[in-house]
């Protein structure tokens, strides 16, 4: 299944930042709720969006993140296992699993700059889980971003174009 990339609508910078932050929070909340198995992440998200009256860029980003996690869950979990083998996915706290999956999904499937995405997810980890999760999220996302940049550079080198 192909995950569509996130599209951005032009808006004032502060307003866009607040919308993105809300979108991440809502995606995290829906994915965390889905960890308990009573609702799918997409249904939980749509209910939350309706309850909070969220539309526009925040809703779009939240949907993109949740769809990416749902579509790529096995791949995301494999990356977590590979990059943080001392933290098996099945033994992570539910909130930490939801944080890592959401963060990696945004990093790999949305147009958000890596530094922005990492900073935002590290802050969400600190807020919702604590300092150990903040360090874990920061380390894993740093490795994912580094690998993604390396892959882009390698792809650019093999097709004749180069990053400058």
Image (cartoon, helix red, strand yellow):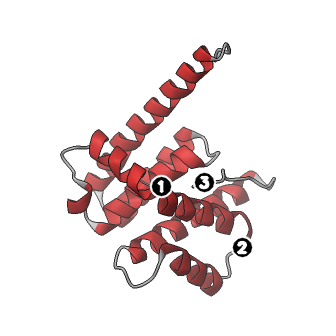
> Residue, x 36% and y 58% (percent of image)?
126
**Left or right of 9 in this view: 140:** left
Circle 1 is placed at which residue position? 72
Task: Please identify, in this view, whether the residue under mark 1 or under mark 2 is nearer the observer.
Answer: 1
Mark positioned earlier in the residue sequence (1 or 3): 3
Secondary structure beneath dot 1 equals: helix
Against 83, residue 21 (above or below) is below
Q: Position of residue 107 (x, y in %)?
A: 52, 45
The reply to whether callout 1 and callout 3 are in contact (CB within 8 Å) is yes
Residue found at x 44% / y 31%: 147
| Dot 3 crowding, Cα within 10 Å, few <14, some 14–19, many 20+ | some
In this view, the residue farthest toward the right is 10
Quarter of the image where the C terminus is located:
top right
Give how far across and how far down residue 153 sits, in percent.
56, 21
| CB contact under 8 Å: marks 3 and 2 | no
Q: Residues within 10 Å of mark 1 (few under 14, many from 20)?
A: some
Residue most extreme to the front: 1
Q: Position of residue 31 (x, y in %)?
A: 44, 70
- Residue at mark 1 to residue at mark 2: CA–CA distance: 24 Å
Q: Residue 86, percent across and down?
A: 18, 46
Write down the residue under mark 2: 55
Give the spatial CA distance, label 1 vs label 3.
Answer: 8 Å
State yes or no: discs 1 and 2 in contact (Cβ < 8 Å).
no
Quadrant containing the N terminus in the rendered view:
bottom right
Of the residues under marks 3 and 2, which one precedes in the sequence?
A: 3
Residue ID for mark 3: 3
Foreground residue, 21 or 67? 67
């Amino acid at each position: 299944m192909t995950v569509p990339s996130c599209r951005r609508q032009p808006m004032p910078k502060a307003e866009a930042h607040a919308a993105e932050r809300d979108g991440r929070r809502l995606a995290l909340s829906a994915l965390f709720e889905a960890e308990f198995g009573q609702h799918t992440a997409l249904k939980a998200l749509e209910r939350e969006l309706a309850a909070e009256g969220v539309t526009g860029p925040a809703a779009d980003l939240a949907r993109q993140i949740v769809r990416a996690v749902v579509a790529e869950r096995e791949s995301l979990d494999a990356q977590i296992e590979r990059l943080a083998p001392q933290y098996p996915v099945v033994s992570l706290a539910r909130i930490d699993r939801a944080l890592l999956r959401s963060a990696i999904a945004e990093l790999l499937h949305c147009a958000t700059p890596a530094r922005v995405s990492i900073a935002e997810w590290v802050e969400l980890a600190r807020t919702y889980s604590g300092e150990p999760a903040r360090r874990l999220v920061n380390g894993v996302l740093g490795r994912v971003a580094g690998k993604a940049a390396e892959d882009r550079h390698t792809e650019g080198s093999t097709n004749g174009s180069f990053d400058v």
